[in-house]
Image: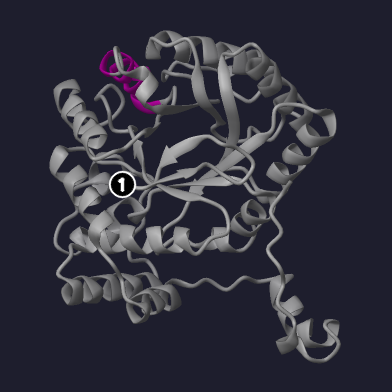
């Protein structure tokens, strides 16, 4: 296991992959029993993992409860991230959901209790509610940071423009900075290449990449069975509903055959290589439901794709960037004095 700082604007150290614990518990959907969750966390720690990701809504709060018990006596050895916005139960209504400062405080207090801790290392705003002003979000996160209840904050599943505005407001107001973004990213979901990833790289934000296996599609298992997220969760899953996705799965299976690795390991190995090519740290969030699944994920840390294999996977999964990127590309030569080949844009770290 290797380590990185989470973004270019902070010294927060995290492992190169994060352990996603959305399956810890069985309260809301098929998941992991506490005893198996302990085995998974113990093995993750043994492998050098230090970054854990959860949310108040995962398994209706049970994920946090299980982690609270499992982290007793070793809390300081992990960077613990959680999220608020959804509430922790199916009964959560208008007073326990959303991005308001009121709900933010409620969510943090409830998470601290379930996690049996005095502080949250990284608090994510899980989803934008489309009604809370960005100014209120920034102010609320700043207050919680100054109180010591959270150490860092980030935005999950937010459009790039909302994140960029929040980062700018925090800078201008001297508030606690936003240090990271969390978004879906895999060989079958690369639309973040259009705006979110370029924004994160330009602003020096860390990136947490959820669902690196496309909900299980990239394991190839749905070609022979429908069991998994497809039947148990019925969401956060991709199917072969386009020619490109079929081509991507074909390519993953072919590279797996060439390397002797499992398809899931190839998919994660590609995500790690994509992260290595980024100018800002990107951390895949793995979500094993069983110990054998975790072992598969950890095996990906030893898989090395050669340049040709990486290029094949990159090309088959690439998405069109659309406007305004296409028109900018077509006009680039003229904008650079008629000879675009002479210009190489510098990477300027955020101060």
Q: How many marks?
A: 1
- The colour scheme used to paint the residues is one colour
In the depicted view, which residue is nearer to us: 48 or 217? 48
In the rendered image, residue 278, in percent from the top left (x then y), is placed at 53, 60
Task: Please tell me whether residue 20 is drawn above or below residue 220 in the rendered image.
Answer: above
Residue at point 75% right, 32% down?
134
Task: Please tell me whether residue 276 is drawn above or below residue 3 in the rendered image.
Answer: below
The answer to which image quadrant residue 158 occupies is top right
Q: Secondary structure at mark 1?
A: loop
In the rendered image, residue 103, in percent from the top left (x then y), is placed at 61, 16
- As for residue 68 lying within the magenta part, the answer is yes
In the rendered image, residue 148, in percent from the top left (x then y), is placed at 59, 13
Q: Which residue is mark 1?
A: 1
Query: Would you say the magenta stretch is mainly helix, strand or loop?
Result: helix
- As for residue 44 lying within the magenta part, the answer is no
**In this rendering, position of residue 149 left or right of residue 261:** right
In the depicted view, which residue is nearer to us: 127 or 46? 46
The answer to which image quadrant residue 347 occupies is bottom right
Q: Is residue 324 visible?
A: yes
Residue at point 49% right, 64% down?
277
In the rendered image, residue 319, in percent from the top left (x then y), is placed at 52, 71
The answer to which image quadrant residue 42 occupies is top left
Q: Which residues are magenta?
A: 58-70
In the depicted view, which residue is nearer to us: 224 or 138? 138
Mark 1 burial class by Cα count in 10 Å: few <14, some 14-19, many 20+: some
In the depicted view, which residue is nearer to us: 73 or 218? 73
Task: Please tell me whether residue 216 is drawn above or below residue 141 in the rendered image.
Answer: below
Q: Is residue 31 visible?
A: no
């Amino acid at each position: 296991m290797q380590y990185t700082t989470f973004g270019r604007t902070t010294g927060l150290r995290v492992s190169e992959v994060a352990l996603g614990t959305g399956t810890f518990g069985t309260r809301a959907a098929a998941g992991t029993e506490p005893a198996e969750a302990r085995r998974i966390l113990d093995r993750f720690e043994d492998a050098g993992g230090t970054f854990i990701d959860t949310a108040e809504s995962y398994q209706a709060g049970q994920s946090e409860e299980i982690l609270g018990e499992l982290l007793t006596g070793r809390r300081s050895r992990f960077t613990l991230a959680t999220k608020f916005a959804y509430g922790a139960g199916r009964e959560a209504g208008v007073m326990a959901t959303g991005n308001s400062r009121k709900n933010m405080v409620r969510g943090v207090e409830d998470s601290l209790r379930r996690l049996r801790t005095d502080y949250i290392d990284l608090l994510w705003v899980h989803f934008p509610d489309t009604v809370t002003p960005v100014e209120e979000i920034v102010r609320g996160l700043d207050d919680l940071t100054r109180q010591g209840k959270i150490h860092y904050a980030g935005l999950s599943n937010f459009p790039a423009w909302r994140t960029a505005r929040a980062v700018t407001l925090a800078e201008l107001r001297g508030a606690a900075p936003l240090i990271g973004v969390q978004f879906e990213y895999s060989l079958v979901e690369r639309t973040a290449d259009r705006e979110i990833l370029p924004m994160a790289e330009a602003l020096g934000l860390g990136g947490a990449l959820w669902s690196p296996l496309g909900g299980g599609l990239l394991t190839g298992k749905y070609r022979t069975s429908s069991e998994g997220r497809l039947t148990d969760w019925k969401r956060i899953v991709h199917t072969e509903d386009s020619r490109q996705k079929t081509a991507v799965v074909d390519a993953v299976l072919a590279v797996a055959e060439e390397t002797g690795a499992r398809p899931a390991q190839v998919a994660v190995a590609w995500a790690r290589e994509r992260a290595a090519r980024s100018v800002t740290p990107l951390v895949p969030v793995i979500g094993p439901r069983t110990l054998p699944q975790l072992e598969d994920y950890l095996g990906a840390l030893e898989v090395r794709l050669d340049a040709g294999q990486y290029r094949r996977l990159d090309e088959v999964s690439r998405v069109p960037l659309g406007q305004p990127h296409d028109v900018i590309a077509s006009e680039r030569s003229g904008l650079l004095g008629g000879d675009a080949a002479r210009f190489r844009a510098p990477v300027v770290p955020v101060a």
